[in-house]
Amino acid sequence: QKEVEQNSGPLSVPEGAIASLNCTYSDRGSQSFFWYRQYSGKSPELIMSIYSNGDKEDGRFTAQLNKASQYVSLLIRDSQPSDSATYLCAVRLYGQNFVFGPGTRLSVLP
Amino acid sequence: ETGVTQSPTHLIKTRGQQVTLRCSSQSGHNTVSWYQQALGQGPQFIFQYYREEENGRGNFPPRFSGLQFPNYSSELNVNALELDDSALYLCASSLSGDHTGELFFGEGSRLTVL
């Protein structure tokens, strides 16, 4: 069974702080890794993708991948109340079958 | 907006009934995937269609079936509805062979089974 695990949260951070979201996956054959943001009642929206070990930065977001540890994380700098949402980690296996984690609920407090 | 459209947005059915959900993929995308997202959980892969054929299936029973049409739009059919089928059904399109493998989701169809 291929699994993606995340802490369900809620993770609460004050406005302006760094939010750190973590994800582990079980299949070493995983090739691509994604972070989706999902607001309540809405569909998931892609915010970051990462394919090789190391860091990838896009604005206030940084994705980190460590394939040896089977670990991927998302850092959100200068967190804003509008960042409050559920963050889904997704792993792409062979072909295009994505496996999603259960999501971590982030709450940014004004 | 992703350009992926789904209909209907909300619907209510009773146990034992059948439902058909529809999806139009983003322009240029030839692959459609369907996911089920129960409340408080991540999306679960149902199946994927490429060139009008099922091209991968998750752990869902045969009463979940689908179609893809020549224009790449797709339908998800669920027969003999059960209470546990209540969920948000998400359609996602992608470009097969696109090494980025990104999925672009529609707004979803929220199904309630009473």
Image: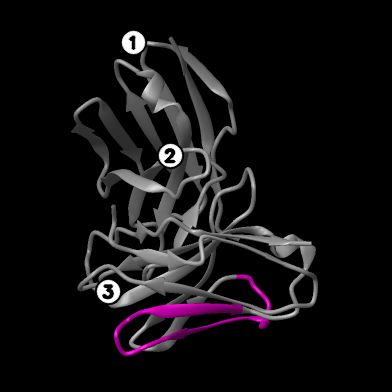
Q: Which residue is mark 1?
A: A16
Q: Does A33 sit above or below residue B26? A: above
Residue beneath disc 2: A69
Amino acid type of the residue that numbered disc 1 sits on in the rendered structure: Gly
Residue B71 colored in magenta in the image: yes
Residue A68 x %, y %: 38, 43
**Quadrant for the C terminus of chain A in the image:** top left
Q: Is residue A8 left or right of residue A53?
A: right
- Residue at 53% over, 34% down: A104
Instruction: State which quarter of the image contains the N terminus of chain A.
Output: bottom right
Residue sitting nearer the eye, B58 or B85? B85
Reply yes or no: does residue A41 show up in magenta.
no
Q: Secondary structure at mark 1?
A: loop
Q: Which residue is mark 3?
A: B96
Q: In whole angstroms, how far apart are the C-alphas of marks 2 and 3? A: 29 Å
Q: Position of residue A31 (x, y in %)?
A: 33, 57
Of marks 1 and 2, which one's residue comes earlier in the chain? 1
Compute the Cα span from label 1 to label 3: 39 Å
Q: Are marks 1 and 2 in contact (CB under 8 Å)?
A: no
Vertical side of B92 occupied by B77: above or below: below
Per the image, label 3 sits on a secondary structure element best described as loop
Q: Quadrant of residue B102?
A: bottom left
Disc nearest the viewer among 1 and 3: 1
Q: Which residues are magenta?
A: B59-77
Q: Amino acid at mark 2?
A: Ser
Q: What residue is shown at x 33% (from left), y 87% (from top)?
A: B51
Name the subunit of mark 3.
B
Left or right of residue B28, residue B24 in this image: right
Q: Nearer the viewer, mark 2 or mark 3?
A: 3
